[in-house]
Image (cartoon, rainbow, N blue to C red):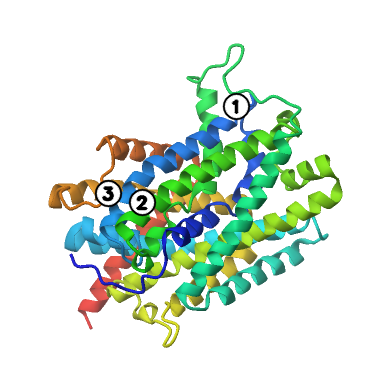
Amino acid sequence: MSLPQTNRKLNLLHATSINMIDMVGIGPFVVMPMVVSCFHDGLFLWAWIFGAFTAFIDAMIWSELGAKYPLAGGTYNFHRIAFGEKGGRLMSFLFVWQTSIQAPLVVASGAIGFAQYLSYLVDLNFIQQKLISGGLVILIFLLLYRKIETVGKISVALWSVVVLTVVWIIISGLTHHQYSIPFLPQGGESFFSYAFWAAIGQGSVNTIYSYLGYYNVCHLGGEIKKPERNIPKSIFISIAGIALLYLLMNISVMGVVPWVSVREDERYLVSTFMAQIYGHKAGMIVTVLILWIAMASLFAVVLGYSRVPYAAAADENFFKVFSKLHPTKKFPYVSLIVLCGLGFIFSLLFKLADVISSILAMRILVQFIGQSVGVVLLRKRFGTADLPFKMSLYPVPVILSMLIWLFIFLSTGWFALWGALIAITGIVVFYFTKQFKRTQ
């Protein structure tokens, strides 16, 4: 399959920056107390380790597919090629179908978290928080309505602030450490107990949400320079860097704020932590930086997902209007408008905790498990001789990935039913529209 040389302007630094600012949004700051409260024994670090392990295993699949098929749309193209003519169109349509719902939910989750954290600085009622979250989506839309090379430069500037903020938090905690954090089970506890794995499942729904985005570069595959090298590198660098930052940040914060005192509904844990060390003004400064990080993450999320409906429409497997590029700036502006429009609406309607579980439940079946199956089909059909990147120890990563994603899927509770219903509805819509086209 020949790959069109599209607008390839993003280098390794740009790609890694886009991945990392997507991963480190408001997520780790708002879910940290949720994760800690899942573990009565203080072993919450294992939920973050499990999340990193899940991302690393899944990254092998993304890297193999992304390096071989670096096209706009990522999973859309992987499914279309892997599942053949009939199955490929169905699976790729299902991906775009669920993306058209869950991508705006991702945007909404970041905007809602932003508004909640802003209330540390300004006393906001419910209506005011909703106005702030909706306004942030509009701002992100305006920032992205421009050429891709300009977007790449903006992403590097945003990423630098993300890293500096997290490093400041880590150094502050490590230099003021007071409380120990258990890493191994104590007393009669065990890694093999039901209670531990139930906590891992519940906690990892939140930690994996905080890692999501390591694959964002695959959605921009048609805009990456030397994609056969830069896509895998950017994915693994992003996961390694963010995993280290998350673990150190948890150790730092919980070394100052005792984990036994953390409540699940604690909204401003990191701001409180900095205020405890340096005073209220420092708490306000770190809050401003966290809000910057949340905005940066939304920037990367919308950038990546806006390419998915465009890729499907250009392939005549989604509504034709989404295939339009801006006449002078050459980006998929219709897709960007629709994604931000729905994200704006969702940010006004939903709560953060429900949005997080919905996002994971919707992605797992069609995207993550679907790609695990897809990479096996591609290897059987085309072999491995022409793969720019080959995962190690195949098929172990594929089997592990599928088992882990099923475990997380079930851990979302009743949201798993929601994710399954979205997929089933997508199948009905696909065959209905297919039949409708035949009658035209």
State the mark number for residue 232: 2
Q: Is residue 30 visible?
A: no
The one nearer the camera, 152 or 439, is: 152
Query: What secondary structure is marked by label 1?
Result: loop
Whether 385 is drawn above or below 110: the answer is: above
* The C terminus, quarter of image: bottom left
Residue 14 in the image: x percent, y percent?
Answer: 47, 62
Query: What secondary structure is marked by label 2?
Result: helix
At label 3, the amino acid type is Phe
Residue at 27% over, 66% down: 431
Q: Residue tagged by mark 1?
A: 43
* The N terminus, quarter of image: bottom left
Whether 298 is drawn above or below 169: the answer is: below
Q: Is residue 332 visible?
A: yes
Lower sequence index among marks 1 and 2: 1
The local crowd at label 1, few if under 14, some if 14 to 19, many if 20 or more residues have their Cα within 10 Å, is: many
The one nearer the camera, 196 or 437, is: 196
Measure the C-alpha gap from mark 1 to mark 2: 31 Å
Measure the C-alpha gap from mark 1 to mark 3: 36 Å
> Where, by quadrant of the figure, is residue 73 drawn?
bottom left
Q: Nearer the viewer, mark 1 or mark 2?
A: 2
Measure the C-alpha gap from mark 3 to mark 2: 7 Å
Cβ–Cβ below 8 Å for labels 3 and 2? yes
Q: Residue tagged by mark 3?
A: 389
- In the figure, is residue 174 to the left or right of 224? right
